[in-house]
Image: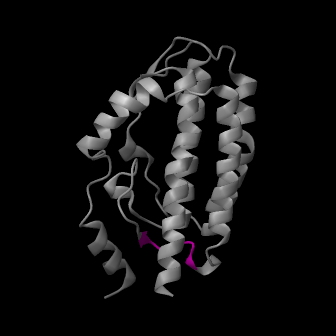
Amino acid sequence: MTQADKDAAVIATLDKPGAGLPLGQQLLLRLYVKPFLAAKPGWEADVASLRKLNDKILDAVAGIPASDLSRRVLVPPQMGLENSSRYWSAAMTLEHMVIVGTGVRNIIVALGNGTVPNIKPDTASVKPAGNGTPADALASFTTFADSVMADIDAKVTNRDSTAKLDHPWFGAFTARQWHWILPMHAVIHLKQLRAIAKGIKESA
């Protein structure tokens, strides 16, 4: 059996992309995380948090041998990670973070200038293709991580705009709440990257 065959066999056991989170997690996000945690403690705290998280993400990737950055690892189920996303490589995870982060940045800028984008965000459309090289994925993530928050701050004119766009898990979110999504999303995939690194190490 080839590696492609093995990958296909694992993927066949997982949910389809965009299937969403288990009901319990959905309820937790809607009933607790959204009203009590989203957009708190604030804009500047989000910036500082994301900077620290991105450094930890790069450290986690640095701990994976370069030859294994494109190796898929099935990680255990975790909060905020769709079942269909559990069998990615480190490079795919970085690719996904850039796709999502770029989209979220554009949404924040639009909402922060009083415009509601004519889009419907969905999780199925932001899965990584995995076609690029690991070096490309790492370079793209590093560039994104270095520039995203400054780019947002340079373009947003009203952090407290009341314009809203639906998030696929949380419902209607303002610019501030979408801003909070960036470090929250990084937390999820930092945990995933550490699980990928652990899986690679244990199988060595």
Residue found at x 30% / y 72%:
10
Q: Is residue 168 magenta?
A: no
- Quadrant including the N terminus: bottom left
Q: Is residue 72 magenta?
A: yes
Magenta-tinted stretch: 68-73
Please indicate whether residue 2 sits to the left or right of residue 178 in the image.
left
Considering the whole magenta stretch, tell me its main secondary structure: loop
Q: Could you say where residue 152 lies in the image, as x and y percent from the top left?
A: 69, 29
Q: Could you say where residue 146 lies in the image, as x and y percent from the top left?
A: 74, 46
Please indicate whether residue 24 sits to the left or right of residue 70 in the image.
left
| Residue 201, above or below 46 | below
**In this orientation, which residue lies closer to the viewer: 151 or 37?**
37
Res 36 quadrant in image: top left
Q: Could you say where residue 84 lies in the image, as x and y percent from the top left?
A: 33, 57
| Observer able to see residue 140 | no
Q: Could you say where residue 29 lies in the image, as x and y percent from the top left?
A: 37, 35
Residue found at x 51% / y 58%:
191
Res 95 quadrant in image: bottom right
| Residue 112, above or below 142 | above
| Residue 54, above or below 123 | below
| Observer able to see residue 139 | yes
